[in-house]
Image (cartoon, rainbow, N blue to C red):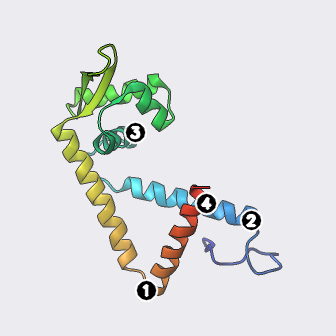
Amino acid sequence: MEKRATEASPGASSGEPGNAELGGQVRSAVGRLYRRFRSERPEGSLGDAALAVLTYLHKHGPQSLTELSDQARVSPASMSQTVNRLTSADYAVRTRDPRDGRRVLFTVTGEGDEIARAARAQRNAWLEDQLAALPPEDRAVITRAIFLLGRIADS
């Protein structure tokens, strides 16, 4: 049976998990939530990497291969494969940078934009449904946790 984050670890004298164990529990819960969130996408949709790039282009506008690979923390060769899939499916196009004609930018197409919007809407709807199903006191705990996790992330 899975251990809840609020349960004390065996042998914890204060009844609360130690910092290392709490950190592990936070990483595990956030990772599981992230993977579950990513799995919510339209049927037949793109893979995780391609959908992430498409969504990034949708939100941030045209980007170079270097910018995309840096953002995704993957090699330019790996990102090149991803953007090649997107461009061959007509979800993105290559354009010249208007400020530097030597540089190639990737821009989402209308069809790619629709896929990114649909995936985002489906993911948001799933999460909103999960949160709405919680009792008010649990939503209040999550509201507080969001503030604290944001503070940790911004440190």
Residue 155, disc:
none
Crowding at mark 1 (Cα within 10 Å: few <14, some 14-19, many 20+): few
Occupied quadrant, residue 112 = top left
Please name the residue that numbered disc 2 is placed on.
19
The amino acid type found where label 3 is placed reads Ala
- The numbered dot on residue 136 is 1
Identify the residue position indicated by label 3 in the image: 49
Q: Describe the element under mark 4 as helix, strand or loop.
A: helix
Mark 1 and mark 2 residues within 8 Å of each other at the beta carbon: no
First along the sequence among labels 4 and 2? 2
Q: Residues within 10 Å of mark 3 (few under 14, many from 20)?
A: some
Q: Residues within 10 Å of mark 2 (few under 14, many from 20)?
A: few
> Where, by quadrant of the figure, is residue 121 drawn?
bottom left
Q: Earlier in the sequence, mark 4 or mark 1?
A: 1
**Label 3, label 2: how far apart the Cα atoms are:** 33 Å
What's the amino acid at mark 4? Answer: Ile
* C-beta proximity under 8 Å, tags 4 and 2: no
At 41% from the left and 32% from the top, the residue drawn is 68
Mark found first going from the N terminus, 1 or 3: 3
The kind of secondary structure element at disc 2 is: helix
Q: Relative to residue 124, is residue 60 depicted above or below? A: above
Q: CA distance from mark 1 to mark 3?
A: 35 Å
- Between label 3 and label 2, give the one nearer the viewer: 2
54 horizontally vs 17: left or right: left
